[in-house]
Image (spheres, helix red, strand yellow):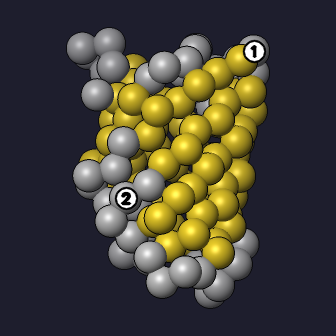
Amino acid sequence: MNYNQKKFRPISNSSNGEVSSEMIFVYEQINDLVFCSYQGEKIIKGHLIGKVDGEGNIDMRYHQVNSSGEMQTGICTSTPEILPNGKIRLYEKWKWTSGDFSAGESILEEI
């Protein structure tokens, strides 16, 4: 699976997450390396970097600065589903590695 130049929008997120529905993530991929930058209502700037396996699963790390000026970090695994229209839906399980160290889940969908 190749994520290069794919755009995703969040369709759900745990309440302890800072990703909001207006955000757009534009992924780039070189071989098995995936990276992205993002920003939105609660996030001034964020980046992710990850590795993709043979089934399209992504093991990633992210860091961001939120609108309160806090630097935040986390880990995430994304599992893809190919929808009937050919678009990708990503099921994400994440955990903060800073702040309260809580965990959550998100779903992103290709636009």
Identity of the residue drawn at 28% across and 28% down: 111
* SS category of the residue bearing label 2: loop
Q: Which one is in front, 46 or 74?
A: 46
Identity of the residue drawn at 34% across and 50% down: 23
> Where does the image place residue 88, in percent across and percent down from the top left?
39, 25
Question: For mark 1, does the 10 Å Cα neighbourhood hold few (<14), some (14 to 19), or many (20 or more) residues?
Answer: few
Decide which of tag 2 and tag 1 comes sooner along the chain. Answer: 1
Label ID, residue 55: none
> Where does the image place residue 107, in percent across and percent down from the top left?
38, 47
In the picture, measured across the screen, residue 39 lies left or right of residue 93, that is: left
Label ID, residue 31: 1
Amino acid at the residue labelled 2:
Gly
Q: Which one is in front, 10 or 43?
A: 43
Identity of the residue drawn at 56% across and 56% down: 46
* SS category of the residue bearing label 1: loop
Q: Which one is in front, 6 or 77?
A: 6
> Where does the image place residue 12, in percent across and percent down from the top left?
31, 55
> Where does the image place residue 48, in percent across and percent down from the top left?
64, 47
Residue 16 in view of the camera: yes
Residue 56 in view of the camera: no
